[in-house]
Image (cartoon, rainbow, N blue to C red):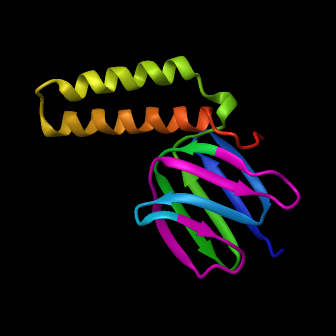
Amino acid sequence: MNSFHISIHAADRAFYEGECESLTIPTSDGSMGILAYHSNMIGAVIPGILKYRAPDEEEVVAAVSAGLVKVEANDVLVLVDTIELPEEIDENRAKRAAAEAKEEMLKKRSREEYLRAQAEMSRAIIRLKVKNSTGKYK
C-alpha cells in the first residue's frame, strides 16, 4: 500500500511524525479521508475524532480540537490546539465537563455564552467517545 509522510502537532507537543497509510480528520467540510497522493489542500480542522494508520500498525484514535490541515506533495501537516489519546482522557472529568456545559446551556444568557457552552459540551462528548473507542493507543 502507498504511504505518505505526516506530522501531527499540538500546541504543547509533537504528537506523531512518520509514514502513514490513511488519515481521517474532522474538517469544516465534514470528515475527510486522506490517502497517499491526495490533492494539495488546506482545511480547517474542527473538534472531533482523528484516526490514522501507520504502515503495519493498528489504527490510532485521538480527540482533537480546532486547527488546520495542509496537504502538499504527499506530505501532510496537522496543527491543532490539543490532541488526546484514549488513555490520556479522564472519563470522570469529561463527564463533569459535559454536565456543566449542559447546565450553562440551559441558563438564559447571551448567545455567545450559549455557543461557548455548546462547544464545551461537544468537546466533552468527543473526549468520551474517544475514551470508549476500540482503536489502538499509541
Q: Residue furthest right?
A: 56
Magenta stretch containing residue 59, yes or no? Answer: yes
Residue 38 in the image: x percent, y percent?
Answer: 64, 79
> Residue 33 lies in magenta, yes or no?
yes
Q: Which residues are magenta?
A: 32-61
Q: As drawn, is 51 to the left or to the right of 104?
A: right
Quadrant where the image shows the C terminus: top right
Q: Tell which of 15 and 125 is nearer to you.
A: 125
Q: Quadrant of residue 85?
A: top right
Among the 4 quarters of the image, the one containing residue 88: top right
Q: Position of residue 110 (x, y in %)?
A: 12, 34
Residue at x-position 63% and y-position 63%: 77
Give left or right: position of 67 versus 38.
Answer: left
* Residue in the picture at 70% in, 46% down: 15
Residue at x 65%, y 34% (from the top left corner): 86
Please tell me whether residue 132 is drawn above or below residue 8 in the rendered image. Answer: above
- Residue 51 rendering spot, x and y as whole percentages: 65, 53
Going by the image, does 111 lie left or right of 76? left
Total count of labels: 0
44 with respect to 15 (left or right): left
Residue beneath the point at 53% across and 17% down: 92
Image quadrant in which the N terminus is located:
bottom right
Decide which of 44, 27 is in the foreground and name it.
Answer: 27
